[in-house]
Image: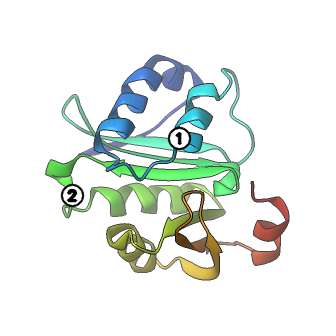
Amino acid sequence: MNVYVLTPVQLKRLRPSILQFAKKYGDQRITHRALRWLKTLKSGPFPEGTWMATAVDGRRLIGFILFGRYGLEESFIVVHPSYRKKGVAETLLQAALDEMDKIYTRVACDNLPSLKLCFSAGLVAFHLIKGPTGKPTLCFGGGEWNPAEFKEKAV
């Protein structure tokens, strides 16, 4: 498995495949808002704190992670079902933590695999909210995160 950080040029070329991958393998947990955000992300330099990477096995896309404005706008991860429980998500999240000084994400409380991923990566749950689908959702921070920044700037 190799992890590749995407540039805006690469995203422009790969965006249709990534959107299809997220819809197909996201287990209906990736919100329409998150997919719309990715679909409408402008070409050109990424805004500050916007970072994304793919995991590939040979030429096969097996995972994808993104953060928009450090996760204050959007964040999600999708791993192909055949590659789950094989360290793909952990590797992608660790790559994000290594590259960015802080990250934020939100995880619905019924999404046990994602909760386990966040806790095992050392992210800190700091706030409980009602998510976009109405479910209880934990807010996580990693790196040099600040709960006040999240409450002030989160979309």
Q: Residue at x 45, y 42 (%)?
A: 53
102 and 98: which one is in front? 102
User: Is 68 drawn above or below residue 140 in the view shown?
Assistant: above
Residue 19 at x, y percent in the picture: 42, 31
For discs 1 and 2, the disc positioned in front in the rendered view: 1
Instruction: Report which quarter residue 62 is drawn in.
Output: top left
For badge 1, the amino acid type reads: His
Q: Residues within 10 Å of mark 1 (few under 14, many from 20)?
A: few
Q: Residue at x 59, y 64 (%)?
A: 131
Residue on which the image places disc 2: 84
| The residue positioned farthest toward the top in the image shown | 13
| The residue positioned farthest toward the front in the image shown | 134
N-terminal label among 1 and 2: 1
- Residue 32, numbered circle: 1
137 and 16: which one is in front? 137
Q: Element under label 1?
A: helix
For badge 2, the amino acid type reads: Arg
Answer left or right for 45 relative to 66.
Answer: right
User: Is 106 drawn above or below residue 22 in the view shown?
Assistant: below
Q: Element under label 2?
A: loop
